[in-house]
Image (cartoon, rainbow, N blue to C red):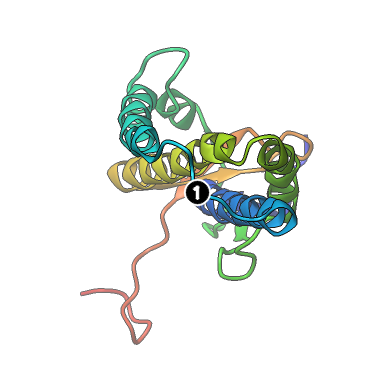
Amino acid sequence: MSLRGAMDRLLHHQLRAVLSACAAIAVALTVPGLVRGFSAPDRPGALALYPGGLLALLLVWMLLKATGVKWFSHVRDFEQAVSVGHPDGTLPADRFLRDRPFSPRLFSLYLALALPLAFWEPWSLGVLPWSALDRVGEAALVVHWERRNGLLLWRGSVEGRPWELSVSPRPPTRTATGAPPA
């Protein structure tokens, strides 16, 4: 097991996945619309219930993930993460979100799922926003956990096993001039 030089913050990974999912949904809705034409749903009243139900289920799902329940909890994974800190106190090199805001792999994966659904039945794509909203919820959970514990969550510290999580101390806060806070 060797440590990689560049790791990915779990928060940045989640936000990249949200952007990739939204882009795939946009492409998957546009392509069949251009090929077959855009049309309105037959029963718009039934479609109005979908977003409310989706948000209610997602809220329950996120609350389960935030607990310590064995099969649902991500918090348990966060707490079992191994510490990665260099002896000199420096933090791992990060692939920042601003440097790479989009994940081509995740986009391809979402598009491979979304395009056949869109050609089969465009309204069946309503399943995919669940994934994007779930990732937003996971990002919020990561931010909450990081702030509460004063640590940063990383993924990809062990080569070949990017799902394993690591933690490192949060870097000291700096002011706009670069000086440490008083």
Q: Is residue 86 above or below residue 173?
A: above
Horizontally, residue 181 falls left or right of residue 158, namely: left
Q: Is residue 91 above or below residue 69?
A: below
Pick the residue in front: 117 or 169. Answer: 117
* Quadrant occupied by the N terminus: top right
- Residue at the image point whose x is 75% and y is 48% from the top: 108
- In the image as oriented, which residue stretches furthest toward the left? 182
* Quadrant occupied by the C terminus: bottom left
Q: Quadrant of residue 35?
A: bottom right
Amino acid, disc 1: Ala
Q: Residues within 10 Å of mark 1 (few under 14, many from 20)?
A: few
Q: Is residue 32 above or below residue 117?
A: below
- In the image as oriented, which residue stretches furthest toward the bottom? 177
- Residue at the image point whose x is 50% and y is 44% from the top: 132
Horizontally, residue 6 falls left or right of residue 98, namely: right
Residue carrying label 1: 40
Q: Could you say where residue 56 lies in the image, as x and y percent from the top left?
A: 30, 30
- Residue at the image point whose x is 32% and y is 22% from the top: 67
Pick the residue in front: 116 or 155. Answer: 116
